[in-house]
Image (cartoon, rainbow, N blue to C red):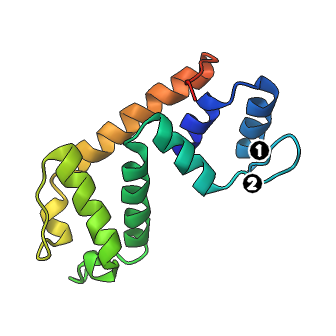
Amino acid sequence: MIRCIYLLSVKDRRLRGQLIVQSLNGQPWTTLEGKRVTDREMVTLSNRLQNWTQNVYKFGCAFVHLSGFYDSSGRDPFDSLTQDERNDIAHHLRYYHGFQMDANTRFRDIVRVLPGVLEKISSNLECYVRDIENDSDLDA
């Protein structure tokens, strides 16, 4: 999503095309001058344009850390998160989905709200991809 918002902010169609090709080829993004486009730059810009995106980014980053640790043997994957990651998840769930999470919340407690969270994120992403396909812009 961060990359889509960044792409929509790029007015230079040659650069936008280059970034898309680099994505499709699994290459790092670079400007036409060869300077690397960092995640930090993309997050900062997208958050300025759509002030909620940094929260989604932090939420996603925290959940990425869960994927390698989750198993069905009874260990709660939240135990592997830092306090900052737990706070990012809690903030996102409270602010955008009305779910109250505290220090005692376990992963199994939030499982019921995750489909709605992921649906909201994916529907926003679909809109941005459609805008890219339609050669639209966001104002920077």
Q: Which residue is mark 2?
A: 28
Q: Residue 81 at what x, y percent from top left?
A: 34, 77
Marks 2/1 in contact by CB < 8 Å: the verdict is yes
Amino acid type, callout 1: Gln
Which one is nearer the viewer's eye here, 112 or 105? 105
The quadrant in which residue 12 appears is top right
The residues tagged by marks 2 and 1 sit, at their Cα atoms, a distance apart of 7 Å
Of 1 and 46, nearer the camera is: 46
x and y, in percent, of residue 101 in the image: 14, 64
Towards the viewer: 22 or 32:
32
Q: In the figure, residue 75 lies in which quadrant?
A: bottom left
What crowding class fits label 2: few (fewer than 14 Cα within 10 Å), some (14-19), or many (20 or more)?
Answer: few
Look at the numbered disc 2 and give the secondary structure of its residue.
loop
Please provide percent x and percent y for residue 17. Answer: 77, 30
Image-based side of 102 in relation to 71, left or right: left
Residue 63 is labelled as none
Give above or below for 132 relative to 75.
Answer: above
Q: Which residue lies under the disc numbered 1? A: 22
Q: Residue furthest right?
A: 33
Under circle 1, the secondary element is helix
